[in-house]
Structures are given as C-alpha cells and as structure tokens.
Image (spheres, grey):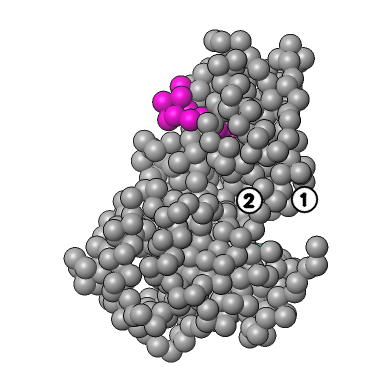
Amino acid sequence: MTKTAFSSLPLAAEQLSNIKSLGYEHMTPIQAQGLPAVLDGKDLLAQAKTGSGKTAAFAIGLLHKLDVKKYQTQSLVLCPTRELADQVSKEIRRLARAIPNTKILTLCGGKPIAPQLTSLEHSPHIVVGTPGRILKHLVDKHSLNLDNLDILVLDEADRMLDMGFYEDIMQIINNTPKTRQTLLFSATYPEQIKDISDAIQNDPVDIRLETSHNENKIKQVFYEFEKGERTQTLISLLHHYHPQSTVVFCNRKQQAKELAEALWAEGFHALALHGDLEQKDRDQVLVQFSNKSSSILIATDVAARGIDIKDLEAVINFEITPDPEIHIHRIGRTGRAGNEGLALTLFMASEAHRVNRIEEYQNTTFKIEKTSGLKRRDNFKLSPPMVTLCINGGRKNKVRAGDILGALTAKTDLPGKQIGKIDIFDTISYVAIERPIAKQALKILSEGKIKGRKFKVRKLS
Ligand code: AMP
C-alpha cells in the first residue's frame, strides 16, 4: 500500500510541523482519501470507525477553514456520547496547537448548564457536543448561534440514529446555513444513513473502507464450553493466555456487573463499563483501564462504542453476539498498529449458530478449540503494572499535567519514567504511577503542593 505524506496537502507550514510533532508520519487511508475533498470544500460521506484516524480527517479540515479573527462559531461536531465528544475535542485541541487563540468548547448533556452558558458568552470557534444539549443551547437558551457555521460534522452518525437523535439532529441542521459543508462519518451504512445523507448533503464524496481491514492481523480462537461453565472458562482463558490488557464483551449490562464481581472474587482487577454508571464512575473506569492500572475491562457494546482503547492484547467475547458486524467491531479493538491481536470467543452448543453466522460473514471456517487444553497456573496473578492516584483538583483549578509531574519529581528522586498517563478533568485529575513506587508518590503529593496549593490525593482502588 502506498503511503501518503501530509505534505501533499495544501496545509500551512505550522500545521504540517505540528502534525509531525504529534508523530503522525503518514495519512491513514481515511485521511488520504477524505482530506483532499474536505479541504476542497466538498461534502463527505465516509465509512470509518474509531481507530481509523477519522477525527483528524475532519479536524484538519475544520482548522484549515477557520478564521480565528472572526469571533463566531464556524464549525460544529455532533457526537453520540460524552466520551466521544471529549476525545474529539482533545484531538482537535492537539491539532489546533498550530493556530493560537482557537476557542474550542465541548457541550454535553449530564453536565451543569451554567458554566456552559458562561463559556458561550464569547462565541467559540468550534463546538463539539451531543445533540440534546446543543439543541438546548440553540433553541431553549438562545446561547448558541450557528448562523455563520461553515462546517457541520456528524460523527458516528449511525450510533446517533440508534440512540434516537434523528429529530434533534434535523432541528439543529435547520438552524444552520444551507451553504455549509457537511461531513458525515458512520461505522456502518444502514439505509437510514443513506437517507439522512440525501436529506442534508450536497453530492457528497463517498468513501467506504473495508470494515474488516485488520481481520487478518487478528488471531481468532473459538472455545465451546459446557452449560454453566461460562465464567470458569473465562478464568481459564485468563490463566492460559495471561493478557496484560483485555476487554471482555458482554451482551447485557447485568451480565457485565455480575462478571466484574465474580472476577474480583477470584482476585482479578476487573472493572465494568455499562450504561448504569454515573458519568464520574465511567470516567474513572476508563482512566484506570487506559492508564494500565486495571487489566480487564468488562463492557457492553453500547458502553464501549466510541471509546478509544488501543493496544489491547486480547478481546474476549464472554457472550458471543448474534450480530456478525458487531463481532467484527468488537475484535477490531485488538491487533492495532501492526501488532497481531488475539480474539477469543466463548460459545455453548445452543449458540453454535452464531459462530456459523460469523463464519459466513467472514467467509471462513474457524477451528474450535477444546477447553480441556487450557492450562491453569499455580499462584497466578494478573496484577496491573500501574496504580492510579486521584487528585481533587482539575482544569478549573488550573492544574495541568506538567504541574503534577513537577510536584512529583522536582524536589524528589522519583524517576519521571515511572510516572504514567495523566488525565485532567474539570475538577479532578488522575495520575498513573508504577505499582512499586505508588506509596511514595502518594506521600509526596499528599504532603506537598501542586502549583503552590494543597490538594487531597488518594489511591483509587
Ligand atoms: P480516531 O480514529 O480519530 O479515534 O484516531 C485514532 C488514533 O490515531 C488517535 O489517537 C489519533 O491521535 C491517532 N492518529 C490519527 N491520525 C494519525 C496518523 N496519520 N498517524 C498516526 N496516528 C494517527
């Protein structure tokens, strides 16, 4: 496959060097195929999922078109979930580093509206948000004005339709200029997507990338278990393969909750991600899994949608899905960035037809392994390499990642390389620390100051 350099695009030199500094060497396929059209002002209908580089495929376009001297909302990105909106904002912020004074605002439901109203007193250049809350600002509060919108992006449009946002989206669109450029991204192409594209787009450039492009880099193994043995078979798989990071998929949230409890009881550090969690708990689960202080994430398909979890050593289908397309989506989370991934699927005799359906969909036959071949280890421990410390101060307290790093390392002999990911939220921050030095780091942060101020710090368990 030929690799296309970003320098082939008509971008400002500052943006090209910023992209380089982010470590993006070549365009991903969606960027190589989509960006020329986006920069040319064309509408785009693109099939792309998380991990394809789709965010940069539109973000570079929004930023290219942006005039920072105009204090008007020039781009709007609609996302199905807060997690995706946060991720998209982060990526746009990274790409906006080359353009000083760009104001990007995230507007999502489940968050207090008053601070959003304050932020909207001066129009942001770019707004990222979920449809319900955007509509509230637009129609109920009149706090958002889209009269000068240049570009509208619908990200994960299929998911937004699944979640019943059709009416909201159409009402938002009715408040935007007809001359706008519309970019529509969707992981799947149901009939409804075609319909919505026909209704809101103008002769879009249509890009479809193969859904299963990294299939061959994923080793798939199927295990048939006896009724009543589902959880024990999963534990045997964890013993046998001892993956460092695993997402275990369940079909129902109740099952996800129960499984997390069962795995804790067996000494595994497993966290469940499902629709019943409060936003703060969802954030904590994702932070702990992505910073390697939890090794197993148990998720339902709905909860996992749109979240950017990379470098997964294994995906385990605790319950096989009846939908082969969902199966492909699940297993696509392992084996990224050229590493071979591992996808393990459990099924019992009454679910065998689901295996057949996936085989038909992928046009292949899978070897079915025996669970008796799975080896359990003595004194087995799958403890995550990191521990998360939680600091009760965040963006609103002007805490930045550099301040936390500084507080930990400036006057101490704590090696910076043993400090992992730092996540800053509005009023709370998280820092991952290698397990052996976690106690020492906790002491330093609790007894010392961050940016000259005392903060409460605790270990997340
Ligand atoms: P997305 O599909 O937008 O969620 O992007 C997946 C990840 O790939 C994000 O962490 C991006 O920062 C990263 N990414 C986007 N474009 C590139 C690129 N051209 N080269 C390397 N990484 C990229």
Q: What type is the residue that disc 1 sits on?
A: Gly
Between 448 and 101, the one lying in front of the other is 101
Question: Mark 2 vs mark 1: which is more N-terminal?
Answer: 2
Residue drawn at the location 80% of the way across and 63% of the way down: 1
Between 280 and 52, the one lying in front of the other is 52
Q: How crowded is mark 1: few (under 14 residues within 10 Å), some or many (20 or more)?
A: few
In which quadrant of this rendering is ligand 1 seen? bottom right
Residue carrying label 2: 211
User: Which mark, residue 338?
Assistant: 1
Please identify the residue farthest to the left as the structure is shown.
140
Residue drawn at the location 38% of the way across and 45% of the way down: 279
Q: Which of marks 2 and 1 is in front?
A: 2
Quadrant housing residue 96:
bottom right
Q: Residue 336 location, x and y as percent?
A: 70, 48
How far apart marks 2 and 1 lie (CA) works out to 16 Å
Residue drawn at the location 67% of the way across and 81% of the way down: 9
Against 377, residue 315 (above or below) is: below
Confirm or deny contact between disc 2 and disc 1 (CB under 8 A): no
Q: Residue 355 location, x and y as percent?
A: 63, 27
Quadrant housing residue 266:
top right
Left or right of 279 on screen, residue 86:
right
Q: What stretch is highlighted in magenta?
A: 245-258
Q: Is mark 2 on a helix, strand or loop?
A: loop
Q: What element carries label 1?
A: loop
Q: What type is the residue that disc 2 sits on?
A: Thr
Against 3, residue 234 (above or below) is: above
